Image (tube, helix red, strand yellow):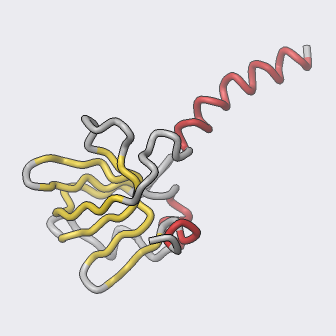
């Protein structure tokens, strides 16, 4: 029974692992500039919805702990603020979605994936 439990556990864990990786993103850095339409700081990832000339982009950040450790909390940005997000866009060009490494709001910079931000 232990082997069956292990196999079932791995079967449930692999989709979650794949979702949280970078495999769905393009390899090169991408910069997005727009206006914040919504902010969510919660599991599994913090997100911003960013209005770019009428198209809403989903900008995924790190999980809540690392996002807040980078200084990005619900208190530092508001709906209507201009934002620049730098990271990796979806490998599917029809999808308005990206995973941000760095956010710039006003004069403040938030590196939510600092080990990747060094390459920007």
The quadrant in which the N terminus is found is top right
The quadrant in which the C terminus is found is bottom left
Residue furthest out toward the right? 2
In the rendered view, tell whether residue 3 sits above or below residue 119: above
Q: Residue 69 vs residue 61: left or right? A: right
Residue 68 screen position, x and y as percent: 49, 69
Residue 30 screen position, x and y as percent: 33, 58
Q: Quadrant of residue 5?
A: top right
Residue sitting at 35 percent across and 68 percent down? 74
Residue 56 screen position, x and y as percent: 18, 47
Residue sitting at 18 percent across and 70 percent down? 82
Residue sitting at 65 percent across and 30 percent down? 14
Residue furthest out toward the front? 28
Query: 11 or 38, which lies in front?
Result: 11
Residue 66 screen position, x and y as percent: 55, 65
Q: How many marks?
A: 0
């Amino acid at each position: 029974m232990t082997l069956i439990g292990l196999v079932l556990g791995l079967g449930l864990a692999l989709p979650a692992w794949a979702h949280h990786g970078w495999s769905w993103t393009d390899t090169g850095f991408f910069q997005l500039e727009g206006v914040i339409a919504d902010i969510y700081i919660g599991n599994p990832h913090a997100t911003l919805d960013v209005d770019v000339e009428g198209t809403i982009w989903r900008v995924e950040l790190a999980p809540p702990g690392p996002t807040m450790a980078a200084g990005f909390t619900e208190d530092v940005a508001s709906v209507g603020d201009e934002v620049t997000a730098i990271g990796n866009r979806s490998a599917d060009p029809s999808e308005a979605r990206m995973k941000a490494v760095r956010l710039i709001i006003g004069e403040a910079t938030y590196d939510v994936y600092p080990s990747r931000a060094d390459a920007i």
